[in-house]
Image (cartoon, helix red, strand yellow):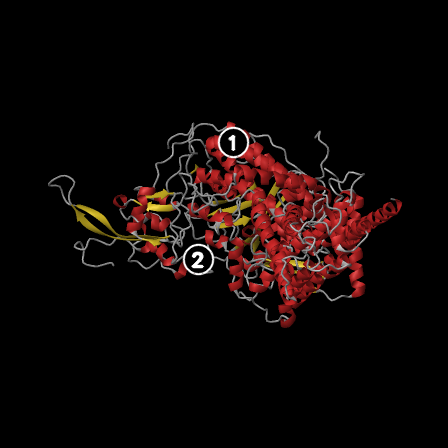
Amino acid sequence: MAKPKVPGVFKGMGITLGIFARTVTKGANTVQYPREKETPPVRARGVIALHQDNCTSCMLCVRSCPDWCIYIEGHKQLAPPRRAGGKPRQVNHLDRFDIDYALCMYCGICVEVCPFDALFWSPEFEYSEPRIADLLHDKSKLSEWMETVPEAPELETGAQKK
Amino acid sequence: MSMLAVEIPYWGQSLLRVLGGLAAVLLPAGAIVYLFLFKMMSFMQSRLGPMEAGPFGSLQLVAEVGKWMQKEDLVPEAADKRIFKMAPLVVLLSTFLLVAVVPFGPDAWFTNFSVGVFYGLAVASVSVLGILIAGWASANKYSLLGGLRAAGQLIAYELPMVLATLGVVIQAESMNLQDIVVAQNTGEIFGFGGLGNPFILTQIIGFLIFMIAVQAELSQTPFDMPIAESELVSGYMTEYSGFRFLIFFIAEFATAGVFAMIASVLFLGGWGVPFEWFSWDTIDSVDDWMNVAGPLIMFTKMLALTFIIMWVRFSFPRFREDQLQTFAWKILIPLALANTAITAILKVAF
Amino acid sequence: MTVLSDRQQLSYIASQAADARLNVELETEGMTLNIGPQHPATHGTLRIICRLDGEQVVWAEPSCGYMHRGYEKLTEVRTFPQVTALVNRIDWLGSFANEVPFILAAEKLMEIEAPPRAQVIRTILFELSRIANVSLFLGDLGVQMGAITPVFLAFRDREYVLNLIEGATGGRFHPNFDRIGGLKDDLPKGWIDETRQTVIKLREFCDTIEDLLFGNEIFQSRTRGIGIIPADIAKDYGLSGANLRASGVDYDLRRDQEIAMSWDKVDFKVWTHPDGDSFARCWVRLQETRESCKIVEQLLDQIPAGPVMTKVPRIIKVPEGEAYVSTENPLGEMGYYVVSKGDLGPFRVKIRSASFNNISIVPWALKGVYVPDIITILASLYFILGDIDR
Amino acid sequence: MPSPYGKGEDDPTADPVEPDTEIVQGVAGGETRLQVFARVKDLDRHVGITIKADVADDQPVIDSWSDVYVGANWHERECHEMFGIGFNGHPDLRNMYLPTDFEGFPLRKDFPLLARMVKPWPGIVDVEQMPADDDEDTK
């Protein structure tokens, strides 16, 4: 390069001073967490939300979870017929649907394998608990997460809808 | 010390000196830690540093001291208990002894030895003992390695520092720090006295060698083999925790402050501004308000020099200790000797 | 590129032999030092037992197993999708790069191939995870040598790449985005031009690190001529990746084998360095990061339209057989030998990880070396503990 | 291995299916139970071959490659501790990962994976029948 060969030692010091000046003038790259919050991307896998009505307790997610951290209990019961005068339908009623976030490794296989689209990802990540036992989110807690589930982002140009 | 127009009994003077000494050591240490270690380092790494404690993290140091105070300071079971407990005090002791000789104003000084420089350099090497004791007494292999490396390095860099100050002493014709300050502020360069004659101009080699030696004495980054975090975990300080680690921490930054003060006295004209400006000619004719302004001027010069020390610390990797030794013995000492010789010859010639 | 003249290499080896002879005469009794499982310089829990004589290493032996999670046993009780979720935790810094060879091996067994769009996106994410992995190495290199600033720059610029990976796959470290027959999903809108800006930032990062660290004379004196590994010894120990190319062996799996990825659509230079010392290894990795930026930029313009997943049954039963696929992972050559019995999960998966061989040279490389150089050589070999212990 | 798919495939009332530890000979083509294979690659001609060797059932010992290829040293140590295959001529066959006093060879199929034994498989639970339908109560 044309400029005289500045010995590496001083060039290094020049760079640190440059960053010093840039931070003083333009501000740092760090986010002061409790005050400013960085919004995670739409697809971030923060927490799993449960849409209760879709769930027919078919146990597919429980069986395909590598960490065995989903627990489901349900029972069959009769539901009012769809059309008047029809036979009462047999419906699986969900008694218990727990996900133990202490074990979960956020791999997303359950959300993907669910045939009835009952599980969704939401980028919420601030649900740490002082006691590890509280990480076992029950049915109602999981349904609370449903509001934080974002719309699916449109895809890049050239993507073909599956 | 009769400047307050009231006769202070002798015990009062020594009490004032003790409080002054504490302030002269701990205040610069606190300022350096906050300004450079917390804020400047983070700005150089594109982050903001501590912002939570106090406005802009100013009370972070208070928080840290509080944290270290209430932490339990362990003494390893196999350690040599008595000297393990004594080591940090020895290191801090050398800093207080050193600050005793630094002049802060025409009358604002702790002691006015005629052999101030000689005393200062002798006392500065006491900290080597403290570090060696800490390394040996911790009964930990990493500390032992750190301690031995520190011993080798600090002794190797005493010599260039002494020889660098030799050049200054020859030019100022006195070992009394007060005279060195006066010599710098009254002298003139080729007849123009407006800038005084700070020895940094004529002793530029001596200044560079002195700063490099100070960097090594403080075991800062290019020379931080003794506290090589990535190898020896934290060298001789590995086993220390709680209050003793706090003493080590304070000692490290207080020594940085005091060495920067000594460097500013020797090379930047210490507490004085060129006497030409206020048409003073000798030390006695300096006005009394200089006793208040002197420490402030000294503080700013110290901060400037510490900025350079810390700036080097945050942008360099680490020497290996044999490279470090060859750099001291084969390059710095011959250079310092040459510098002393040239100064002596020029002194005799002019 | 300065070529270390043979005279320098000979003088380095002669000086070490002289020191070794000196120690023998003095019979100073050595000290056994544990660079223990809990140590700042090992990327994870590697323990090196070395016998020191003064500051010089007489004998060194790494003892692994502190992070052995038994992957090969776990894969035998899991189905194929579950194994992908498991397997990207081996080299947790460039984790998308772990899934790809396993999925390619499974696809080879099923004789299916991902659609072109999926192959290009896979290669882009592969190179992005390489940039994330190696940029952390460049920063961490500074810390091993004592310079504190580069590591913060590395983590700052690596965040942009991780945000990209999270934007597309959902997971910053464990994307779990690869499926047999293609990808789980397509890229979100605006991802491509965000990648373009990130790549520019990454190039700036490489230049900053080069000026701040590689140009530094102290850094060069700490790394040049340290830990010289000649080419034939590197081949013998089975080194791979940048460690091999730094010893002058021109071997890169991305170029030298046909594989169902789109590296052949891109022209990139394979960097080698003749010296084979620590500086060469770090320097080759720096150039490779720049190459990866170039690859990503070229690929971004060639993403074909079309589906991202081929026709694959919902429940995948891989037919019986065995397949070995290896790719050029950020750490070196990583390969999976998958044996399937036609079941839901693999019968046996042998994971050939790069750092396992890269670290097997440590006993040879650390003989007669100073203590600080142990850290230099370990830093330049650049291993991840999950890779060694699996 | 409990089948993760298909509700009907496993009936919760039946006792859990025993993992079939019966050794099926040579899935990957060998005659005996254990088979050692090694991959050698020539970096200049970019050619790699996998060499397989059947190991006798009663006495699983094979010659070591470590004097020819030093890189094989660690691989053989790992193979020895995981499968119990002896390598004669190997400089030091110490355990690579497992503690020195670990008995048993973990990667053999008949070695139990404790993690899966300790915790009951949550997937075994099934939605029980209608209370009124049949008499036997499964819960």
The residue shown at (54%, 42%) is C156
- Say few, some or many: other residues with alpha carbon within 10 Å of mark 2 (under 14 / 14 to 19 / 20 or more): few
- Marks 1 and 2, how far apart at CA: 55 Å
Q: Which mark is residue C196?
A: 1
Please state which amino acid type lies under the numbered disc 2: Glu
Please state which amino acid type lies under the numbered disc 1: Arg
Say which quadrant the N terminus of chain A sits in. top right
Answer left or right for C99 relative to A98.
Answer: right
Residue C116 visible within the image: yes
Q: Nearer the viewer, mark 1 or mark 2?
A: 1
Residue under disc 1 on the same chain as residue under disc 2: no
Horizontal and vertical percent position of residue A124: 38, 45
Q: Which mark is residue B298?
A: none
Horizontal and vertical percent position of residue B156: 76, 56
Horizontal and vertical percent position of residue C164: 48, 38
- Say few, some or many: other residues with alpha carbon within 10 Å of mark 1 (under 14 / 14 to 19 / 20 or more): some
Q: Secondary structure at mark 2?
A: loop
Say which quadrant the C terminus of chain A sits in. top left
Horizontal and vertical percent position of residue C2: 74, 39
Q: Quadrant of residue C213?
A: top right
Q: Secondary structure at mark 1?
A: helix
Q: Chain of mark 1?
A: C
**Which residue was labeled with disc 2?**
D22
